[in-house]
Structures are given as C-alpha cells and as structure tokens.
Image: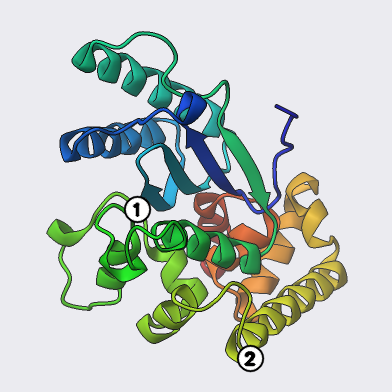
Amino acid sequence: MQRVWKTITGFYHVCARGAVKQLIFESDEDRREFLELMRDCCRDAQVTIVAWCLMDNHVHLVLEDYEDGVSAAMHRLLLTYARRFNKRTGRTGSLFGDRFERRSLDTDWQVMEAIRTVHADPQEAGISLIERYPWSSFAEHLRAYDSNATDATRGFSDPSCVLELFGSAEGFIAYSLSAPGGGQAMQDMKELEWERRAFADKMAKGLGAPLHELKAAPREQRDIVIVGLHNAGFTVRQIERYTGIGKSTVSRIVRARAGR
C-alpha cells in the first residue's frame, strides 16, 4: 500500500478487511473480544478511538494519533485477534488483508464526515438502521450528551471530540442520519468550519507562525501563538486539531501562561 504521510490534525479513517472477504466475526463473543483488544492496543500506543463500527468482514475506525502510534496499534490488534480467532475456529492462513487502509483527515469537516460514514456503514449495506445497529459507537456518543451518564455507561470510544464538533445531541443525530454532504444545515456547518479555521490561521500568522508550521516553530513563538488562539476563544481540542500539537502540550502551555 502507498505510504500515508502523517496528517497535521492527527485524525485518521482506518479500515481493516478480511482477506478475500473472509468473515472476521462469527459471534458476539468475537466482537466483544475484538473491542476489548482494540481498546488495550490503542491505549498502549497512545491512540484515541473516536468512532468505530464492526461489520461481518471488515472494521471501520476513526482514530486520533499524535504520537505516530496507529501502525503499531493496528499491527498488534489485527495480528493478536487473527491468532486467537484462527485457534478458536480451527482455520489457518491470513484472516485480514495484507495491510489496513488509512486515510488522513485534514479538517474538522473531514473528521465529521468520517464519523458519519463509519456509523452509516450498516445502513448503507442494508443491514440495519444507524441508530439500531448494536456494534458501533453511535450509541456511545449519544450517551455522552446525557449529563446523567456515568462512567459505567462509557464504551470503547472517547466522545469528547464528537461533543465539541457537533455541539449538541440534536446536531449529531441530524448530521449522522443525513445523506452524505446533503442539506443546507450540512453546508452551513462546512462553511462555518472553513471560516473558523481560516480565522485561526490568520491569527496564527499575525502572531508569528501559520498553523501548519507551528509544530516546528521555536518554543517561545509556538507558545505565544497557542496562548493567543486560546485567548481568542479556540478550545484546547481545536488548537490540537489545527496544529497537530498534542492536547497535553497545549493544555500545559495554556496553564503555564495563565499563571504568569
């Protein structure tokens, strides 16, 4: 597979398919085992699971990765699961295709579209309505909007990115159930995202470095831009996505400057 260069936003749409359309799940126990292993592998590689969907012969994921850990996480996940599956079922040979697919997501809009596409896969395949399919993170994200939700209701994804991107349960549901790229509301959201990023880039340039160069900028200059963006109303998550600088680093810079 052609090399995929690291995206500045840190977000990727990943797909792993069974070799020659081989079924990779034969039972709900298989699916639960895959999810548990997925969570462990991604956590150990410092990769955040934003969205996921398990189909019979393939898996869709939206991942957030600022430490270049996607390859290690996916290699361990697919190899370990394949070994366990083959041992349990008595089959031999490769369970997955030669290499997982990975596509960089370079804007908030692309991240939103990827999340919608991942959740819509069962409906597009004629298997189940999006909101009724039990093996995706759609329900996890809805629960995240419920202020009464507890840690016990959390699943395998981190909903914080989705909460910020869509702003409300109504917005998330409307966008998720819409046709791809359709509707005036969807166009308005796309234009708003473009305007927000363009404003952030203009401000960053005025403070000394454009967004795409900020990660490699001198530390003092980098910190000035980050604090300036935060003071202008951009959240830590937005700065993280726009610059590719990890959330912990952005938070530390903001806290340190605020304490001066």
* Residue located 78% across and 60% down the image: 211
Q: Where's residue 61, x and y in %?
A: 46, 47
Quadrant into which the N terminus falls: top right
Q: Where's residue 49, x and y in %?
A: 42, 48
Foreground pick, 217 / 98: 98
Mark nearest the camera among 1 and 2 is 2
Characterize the local packing of mark 2: few (<14), some (14-19) or many (20 or more) Cα atoms within 10 angstroms. Answer: few
* Residue located 46% across and 24% down the image: 96
Q: Where's residue 177, x and y in %?
A: 44, 76
Characterize the local packing of mark 1: few (<14), some (14-19) or many (20 or more) Cα atoms within 10 angstroms. Answer: many
Give the spatial CA distance, label 1 vs label 2.
Answer: 29 Å
Q: Please report whichever mark, 1 or 2, sits nearer to the chain's N-terminal start.
A: 1
Number of numbered discs overlaid on the protein picture: 2
**Secondary structure under badge 2?**
helix
Say if residue 209 shows up in the picture.
yes
Q: Where's residue 87, x and y in %?
A: 24, 11
Q: Determine the residue located farthest toward the front in the rendered image.
A: 126
Say if residue 255 shows up in the picture.
no
Question: In this rendering, would 196 be left or right of 51?
Answer: right
Question: In this rendering, would 3 be left or right of 118?
Answer: right
Three-letter residue code for mark 2: Gln
Foreground pick, 29 / 227: 29
Foreground pick, 199 / 79: 79
* Residue located 72% across and 83% down the image: 191
* Residue located 36% across and 67% down the image: 130
**Secondary structure under badge 1?**
loop
